[in-house]
Structures are given as C-alpha cells and as structure tokens.
C-alpha cells in the first residue's frame, strides 16, 4: 500500500464548533481511510501554516483521492493537501529507472 501525508487547515467556523464541542478527530479520520481499505498511522494537530497532519496508507492513489475529495467537499477545511510518500526502496527503484530515461533539457 502507498503512504500519504496530508496537511490541512480548518475554517474559522469549524474552529468555533470545535471550541463549543471539543472532539478528537482521530476516530473520524480512521473511519474515512478504513472505508477504502486503508489505515491511519498518525494524526497530529499543530499551529502555524497548517492546523493538522495525517499519515496514512491507502491501497492506491484513487482510494486516497476519494478520501481527500470527500473530506474537502465536507466544508470543514479551508485547505487540504496530500503528498504521496516514497519508501527508500521505491526511491532506489526510481533512481535506477531514471538512468534509462532519455531526457533532453529545453534548448539543447
């Protein structure tokens, strides 16, 4: 399974609701990813540019995209960004394949 890092920020309205009714969102995040056959590895809240971070696995990019789309469409977030993470082994394989790519820089 592929591993993904998601960074997100809540809307001011979501913060107001969570102040009124505090909620641990890990269970909700776990349910979202498990619904597509994935697994939640971590959920962190933060302050700064993003309000939170998730680390999770999904069977494929389409499954992860479905989760991200559903969360984004829910209206509770002002931003959501997901990055596919590569293992060291995957990077090593990609480096090997890069040797066979016949790339030519523009203008050369």
Image (tube, rainbow, N blue to C red):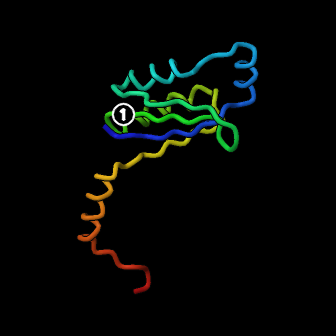
Image coordinates for residue 60, horizontal then vertical, percent: 33, 38
Q: Is residue 2 above or below residue 99?
A: above
The quarter of the image holding the C terminus is: bottom left
State the residue at coordinates (51%, 19%): 28
Q: Residue at x 26, y 71 (%)?
A: 99
Residue 67 to residue 84: above or below: above
Furthest residue to the bottom? 108
Q: Residues within 10 Å of mark 1 (few under 14, many from 20)?
A: many
In the rendered image, the vertical position of residue 82 relative to residue 27, given as above or below:
below
SS at mark 1 in the image: strand
Q: Would you name the residue on which mark 1 appears?
A: 58
Figure quadrant of residue 64: top left
Total marks in image: 1
Q: Position of residue 104 (x, y in %)?
A: 35, 79
Q: Position of residue 73 (x, y in %)?
A: 56, 29
Q: Residue at x 54, y 42 (%)?
A: 81
Residue 26, given in percent of the width and then of the height, sits at 53, 22
- The one of 81 and 70 positioned closer to us in this rendering: 81
Query: Residue 78 sits in which quadrant?
Result: top right
Vertical arrangement, residue 98 with respect to residue 24, above or below: below
- Quadrant where the N terminus lies? top left
- Left or right of 80? Residue 67 is left
């Amino acid at each position: 399974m592929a591993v993904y890092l998601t960074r997100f920020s809540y809307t001011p309205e979501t913060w107001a609701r969570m102040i009124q009714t505090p909620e641990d969102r890990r269970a909700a995040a776990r349910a979202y990813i498990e619904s597509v056959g994935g697994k939640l590895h971590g959920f962190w809240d933060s302050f700064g540019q993003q309000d939170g971070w998730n680390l999770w696995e999904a069977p494929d990019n389409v499954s992860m995209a479905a989760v991200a789309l559903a969360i984004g469409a829910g209206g509770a977030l002002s931003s959501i960004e997901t990055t596919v993470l590569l293992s060291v082994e995957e990077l090593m394989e990609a480096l090997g394949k890069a040797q066979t790519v016949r790339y030519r820089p523009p203008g050369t």
